[in-house]
Amino acid sequence: MAMKNLVWLLAFAPLLLAGNNPATVTDEDVEKFAAWARNRNPSELTGAVSEQKLRANVEKLVSFGTRHTLSSPTDPERGIGAALRWTEEEFERYANACGGCLEIVTPSDTVTGRRVPNPTTVTNVFAIQRGTTDPNRVVIISGHIDSRVTDVMDFTSDAPGANDDGSGTAAVIEAARVLSALKFPATIVYAVLSGEEQGLLGGKIMADYAKEQGWQVMANLNNDIIGNSCGSDGKCDAAHVRVFSEGPRWQGRDDLAAAQRSQGGENDSPSRNLSRRIDTLADDLSLGLDVRQIWRNDRFGRGGDHTEMLNAGYPAVRFSVAVEDYDHQHQDLRVENGVEYGDTIDEMDFSYLAKVTKLNVAALAALARAPMPPEPIVEGAVSTDTTIKWRGVGAADYIVRWRPTDSANWQESVRVPGGTLGHILKGIRVDDWVFGVSAVSAKGYESPVASAVPGGAFEPYVAPAPAQ
């Protein structure tokens, strides 16, 4: 059997039938497994995620000493340059294993700013898995590779960055390992970002690259600090992951404000509906991990790379642990009053990291197989009925959903066939409800809901040009 097939097969060893010996597997076995894997549902795909591989990835990232954005770009063993080269090599290994299904690109920009006093090249590493039928529709998983200590400008001290954000970077690389052997209608981008600690620089480079490529971004799943289950106060929670999402759409907010004041939309941005979709998916997976939707863009007074995607008009959410350990992030390595500080690997929970990674893998697979959400509008002022209309997206079916205006999640629904681009809800008064529509593929994969409110559609919002 060809070496690339053996590597590919080993990547999926947890999913094989008990008793198979990979060393004796034939090409026919590989083809049978590929046929089986191609149409698996998200819960079955998660079984390929390896806790051991995640640990090995974080150990390797920590071994670079520091990954500070301003550290050496050329040292072969220490610093951001060595870490980025290793990441690129990992992606290339998976690309070889899947017969070249991943295109490796390294978007970069030369940056100067408050936390970058001298012109510095900031580089991301992307592995792009092109979609088979809808390659311009894109879902992105991201994590930042750079690390820091207490002084954000200290680029010489050891900064292990195990959890922040070795955990997120490891999840991105593991997702590429697991999913690259399969084919999806949409494109999946595995994005490792630099410069987050110096001002979300890699996130801005990613957003700019998406616009330059003309990508129709359906979702950015940003993973930042996803590898611990106990906080600095001793509180532990391995059963939940927080998913942060913005409420009113940020980009173009001034132009949307008047319409939102009249029609609502404070709780219905594309990112908020993406969060709802991930929550529902987690409930279906039985991973022992529930989503706690946090309804703000990020942690109080803090930020992550997904914010730059939101600024560009793309749906984006942040995954983060249920309880943060503040003694082991953004800290110099030291012991004070018997307390150990520093972002070290011994403070991580790799079983928890594996569960969060599995949820990401399932979400990527489900979204990359689902249609783009439609763009609905709602009518029904001074009427006892409500009419929902939407632009078709080639779906097999659509699901019209609605909920009371003070409810968190969708409560009512009706399914309509794909050739139908509208539906009348008899006896439902438009004033008292929020409405939305999702699209369903022929194989049952459902998109996030697009809300029928200003700013609720998934197309990147572009503010009107100034009047001439």
Image (tube, helix red, strand yellow):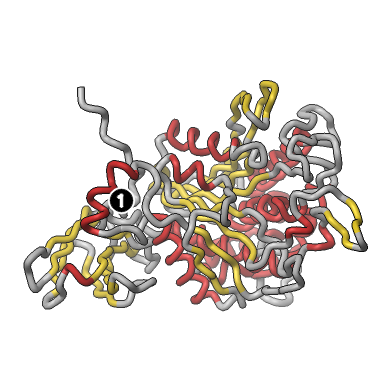
Residue at 28%, 77% in the rendered image:
412
Q: Is residue 224 left or right of residue 22?
A: left
> In what element is the residue under mark 1?
loop
Closest to the observer: 277 or 10?
Answer: 277
Q: Residue 383 appears at what percent x and percent y?
A: 7, 69
- Residue at the extreme front: 337
Q: Residue 342 appears at what percent x and percent y?
A: 82, 53
Q: Is residue 59 left or right of residue 37?
A: right
The quadrant in which the C terminus is found is top left
Q: Is residue 47 above or below residue 258?
A: below
The quadrant in which the N terminus is found is bottom right
Closest to the observer: 85 or 382?
Answer: 382
Dot 1: few (<14), some (14–19), or many (≥20) neighbours within 10 Å? many
Q: Residue 51 appears at what percent x and percent y?
A: 73, 65
Can residue 267 be seen here? The reply is: yes
Closest to the observer: 244 or 233?
Answer: 233
Report which residue position mark 1 lands on. 455
> Image quadrant of residue 467?
top left
